[in-house]
Every structure is written in structure tokens, then in C-alpha cells.
């Protein structure tokens, strides 16, 4: 095994498997711009390395990622101009050419859930918890959540997750087709590595083409949906509820929404 560590990403290789571990434990792996940019750099390295045939993106036992970094988002006066390059990293994860597996334990919320959904497969620990709580801070998913989740689980459940803030346990995620398997907490990363190693044993060109075909079947016209979602995400930054929701979150108090 080889490994390198930046401040926010631990990058490892085990045989033909590349591993990127999110590493902001003090904030439950909140997905700051710098963390996502570091993840993108790691993925570019894996893409260029012909010896890497599958990739695992993981968090800790406590949190895959508890969401975006709200402190960075709250004062976005022109969200389209300031956030587009940041949010587009999720899209690039979704378009990554080699098979990707999210190893999820603990919280996978908001942008964390969206990052897991952008991967091709999810191995979840029994402690995994999935959700899109953006509604509670006055916005909505902006990194693919409404589009990718709906294509997996259908309209009704996606509505409940996005609008009512329903959270899904690991077993529910398995039942609804979000997770590929659920395993004990202590083995979630090892199980993800095993699946990646199994994929890495397959012909890499065939694996890529198969991935492309499955993605095409699932994501037909997804670009239109993503743009539709993104524009409305930006529009919500014009509301008082967005400002109230994010301020309340950072001040650790209950928000008082006015519908304005």
C-alpha cells in the first residue's frame, strides 16, 4: 500500500484500487471548497494512473460527510458566480470514467449524500444515515441530490427526503436501492475495498464501457435536470429564509422562517 496525506484528504493505493479518505473529523467532514478541490486533484491522479482500475471514496466511522460547509455558503451574494465551480465538482465525480464506490458510515447528509450518490456504488455501514436537510436552512439540494436520488427511488420518496427532511437508515437505503450492501461498522471500508478489488480484476475497458452504458440508462437528460435544480438553488439565495436558516445553523439555534 502507498499513501499520501494532505490536510483534508488521505490518498492511498492498494494494488489497483485508489482510495481517497475525507479528513476533516473536527467538522464531520464538512465539504469545504478546499476539501472538494483536493478530492478532485486525487481523482485526476487516479484517472491518469493506468494501474488504478477502481476508486473508493470514504469518510470516517462517524461521518462520511455531514454536508457542505455552511460557513462558506451563507454569504454568497452571487451564488451562481461564486458556487458554480465548487458545485460542478460533484458533477465531475459523477462523470469520473473509472468505477467509483462510496464507503459510507455515519452521517451522509446534504452534499455528503450527493457525493455518495455521484459514485457508482455505495457500501454502507449499519450506522450510515442518509438525508438531504438543506430545506432546514432555507435552500434545497444543489449538487445533484434531487436528480440522482429521484432516478433511484422514484418521485414520492425523493419528495419526502428533499421537502420533509426524511432521513434514511442504512437498511432503508439498501431496501430502496441506494446502497449495494450494509455491513458492520468495523468492516465498511474493508468491504468497499474488496468490492473495488473485485472490479479491478475485470477488463478495465469493458468495465468503463459497462459503466457508461449503465449511467446512460439512468441519467438520460440529467443535464437538463441538473441545470433546472441549480438555477432554483441559486434563486433561493435571494430569500430571507436562506439567510435566516444559515445564520441560525451557525448560531446553533432554531430558525424562524417567514416564507419570504
Image (cartoon, rainbow, N blue to C red):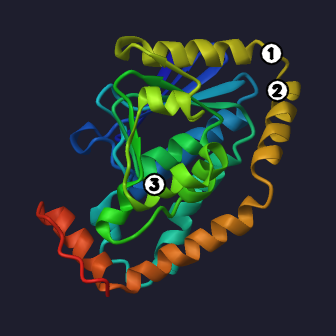
Label placed on residue 207: 2
Q: Between tags 2 and 3, which lies in front?
A: 3
Compared with 118, 210 (above or below) is above
Task: From the top left corner, tell me how far across and down residue 233 is, in percent.
Answer: 49, 73
Of 192 and 17, which appears nearest the observer? Answer: 192
Q: Give how far across and how far down residue 11 sits, in percent.
A: 48, 30
Label 1 with label 3: CB-CB less than 8 Å? no
Residue at 26% of width from left, 69% of height from top?
A: 246
Which element carries disc 3, helix, strand or loop? helix
Gap in Å between the C-alphas at discs 2 and 1?
7 Å
Structural distance between the alpha carbons of marks 2 and 3: 34 Å
Q: Earlier in the sequence, mark 1 or mark 3?
A: 3
Q: Position of residue 109 (x, y in %)?
A: 38, 47
Quarter location, residue 249: bottom left
**As drawn, 35 above or below 53:** below
Task: Tell me if I can see residue 160 in this picture.
Answer: yes
On the image, which quarter does residue 253 sit in?
A: bottom left
Quarter of the picture holding the C terminus:
bottom left
Residue 146, x across and y down, in percent: 56, 58
- Image marks 2 and 1: residues in contact by CB distance under 8 Å: yes
Which is more N-terminal, label 1 or label 2?
1
Residue indicated by mark 3: 160
Mark 2 nearby-residue class (10 Å; few <14, some 14–19, many ≥20):
some
Mark 2 or mark 3: which comes first in sequence?
3
Circle 3 residues within 10 Å: few <14, some 14–19, many ≥20: few
Residue at the spot of label 1: 202
Q: Secondary structure at mark 2?
A: helix
Amino acid at each position: 500500500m502507498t499513501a499520501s496525506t494532505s490536510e483534508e484528504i488521505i490518498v492511498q493505493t492498494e494494488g489497483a484500487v485508489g482510495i481517497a479518505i475525507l479528513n476533516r473529523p473536527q467538522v464531520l467532514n464538512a465539504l469545504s471548497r478546499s476539501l472538494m478541490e483536493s478530492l478532485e486533484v486525487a481523482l485526476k491522479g487516479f484517472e491518469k494512473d493506468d494501474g488504478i482500475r477502481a476508486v473508493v471514496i470514504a469518510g470516517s466511522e462517524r461521518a462520511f460527510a455531514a454536508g457542505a460547509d455552511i460557513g462558506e455558503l451563507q454569504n454568497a451574494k452571487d451564488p451562481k458566480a461564486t458556487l458554480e465551480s465548487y458545485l460542478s465538482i460533484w458533477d465531475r465525480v459523477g462523470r469520473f470514467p473509472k468505477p467509483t464506490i462510496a464507503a459510507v458510515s455515519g452521517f451522509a447528509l446534504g452534499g455528503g449524500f450527493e457525493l455518495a450518490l455521484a459514485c457508482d456504488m455505495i457500501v454502507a455501514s449499519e450506522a450510515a444515515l442518509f438525508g438531504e436537510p438543506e430545506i432546514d436552512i432555507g435552500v434545497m439540494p444543489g449538487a445533484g441530490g434531487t436528480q440522482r436520488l429521484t432516478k433511484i427511488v422514484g418521485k414520492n420518496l425523493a419528495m419526502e427526503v428533499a421537502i420533509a427532511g426524511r432521513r434514511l437508515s442504512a437498511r432503508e437505503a439498501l431496501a430502496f436501492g441506494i446502497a449495494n450492501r450494509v455491513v458492520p461498522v468495523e468492516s465498511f471500508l474493508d468491504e468497499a475495498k474488496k468490492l473495488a478489488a473485485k472490479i479491478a480484476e475485470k477488463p478495465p475497458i469493458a468495465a468503463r464501457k459497462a459503466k457508461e452504458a449503465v449511467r446512460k440508462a439512468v441519467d438520460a437528460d440529467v443535464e437538463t435536470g441538473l441545470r433546472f435544480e441549480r438555477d432554483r438553488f441559486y434563486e433561493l439565495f435571494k430569500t430571507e429564509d436562506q439567510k435566516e436558516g444559515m445564520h441560525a445553523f451557525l448560531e446553533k439555534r432554531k430558525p424562524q422562517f417567514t416564507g419570504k
